Image: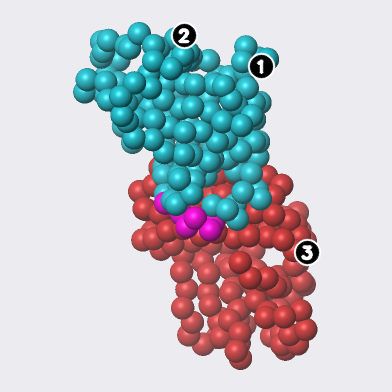
Chain colours: A red, B cyan
Amino acid sequence: MGVEIERKFLVAGDRWRSGDHPSQGFRQFYLARADGFSARVRIVDEAQAFLTLKTGRGRSRGEFEYPIPLRDAHDLEAARTGELIAKRRHRIAHGRHVIEVDVFEDALHPLVVAEIELETEEDDVALPDWFGREVTDDPAFSNAALAADGLPEEFRS
Amino acid sequence: MGVEIERKFLVAGDRWRSGDHPSQGFRQFYLARADGFSARVRIVDEAQAFLTLKTGRGRSRGEFEYPIPLRDAHDLEAARTGELIAKRRHRIAHGRHVIEVDVFEDALHPLVVAEIELETEEDDVALPDWFGREVTDDPAFSNAALAADGLPEEFRS
């Protein structure tokens, strides 16, 4: 478990779509979501599935990911808590970093969120000009909150 | 996922110990325990570890078990809910069945519980005479309840 520094931003418009980049379709849901522990199932392109456990709070967090049979993932959906999240993740090269742009679907449309992972807190990477407001510390934009509470107020029409 | 019919009994005395039988030491704890979902980590003989998810209620239950690295199991202990359960499981041949006798340790000493798995509800296996009171339907004797609530009242001295 390394220390992970991720910053998260809202994305407006389509400028980030220029150029080719790979993408994957995710369907994911939570089995448990408590203070200090969550269990998530993610199905990728209807072909692979992963169980991810996240533990801890603040700076002492752990993340544990295990591949599981696709059939188990489907069976486990009966025990989900909160809504199913469907999104397409696009991976965009940005210098020596990779930006992940998540385009949410269904109930969470039209939310688009970008994440960039930094190596140190001092990493002074130039952010792309299509990044909007930073929501790194806004709990309403965590995937667990999106699954439990749905689209944040400002996106509801 | 098959339908599993398990009956559980208290065990008093040491008559079940006659003869040789294999045993394993378990240390286990829960990461989540809610109505309809639990996640348990079990460390076997300090050599192997498993993550077990149980879903559902009543007759529509699912059980999903995955081997995980021993190191992950130790790291996950920081996120446990309830107490650590330590017990030694003895497997005893009984005709074409196997009886599992769990001898609890530490805070749950001197509890001893036996389980037998039947193939059908009509399975009329003769039970050994060292079986005590049946606790199949007594929620106080589930492992999840023992981890959360400790030794049932009648065992406290």
Q: Which residues are magenta?
A: B67-72
Name above or below for residue A81 compared with residue B88: below
Check chain identity for marks 3 and 2: say if they share one.
no
Marks 3 and 2, how far apart at CA: 54 Å
Q: A152 or B40: nearer the eye? A: B40
In front: label 3 or label 1: 1
Q: Chain of mark 1?
A: B
Badge 1 local density, few (<14 within 10 Å), some, or many (20+)?
few
Name above or below for residue A66 compared with residue B149: below
Q: Does the magenta-highlighted stretch encompass residue A142?
A: no
Q: A21 or B99: nearer the eye? A: B99
Q: Position of residue A14 (x, y in %)?
A: 61, 78
Q: Amino acid at mark 1?
A: Arg
Name above or below for residue B122 compared with residue A88: above
Q: Amino acid at mark 2?
A: Arg
Mark toward the start of the polypeptide (2 vs 1): 2
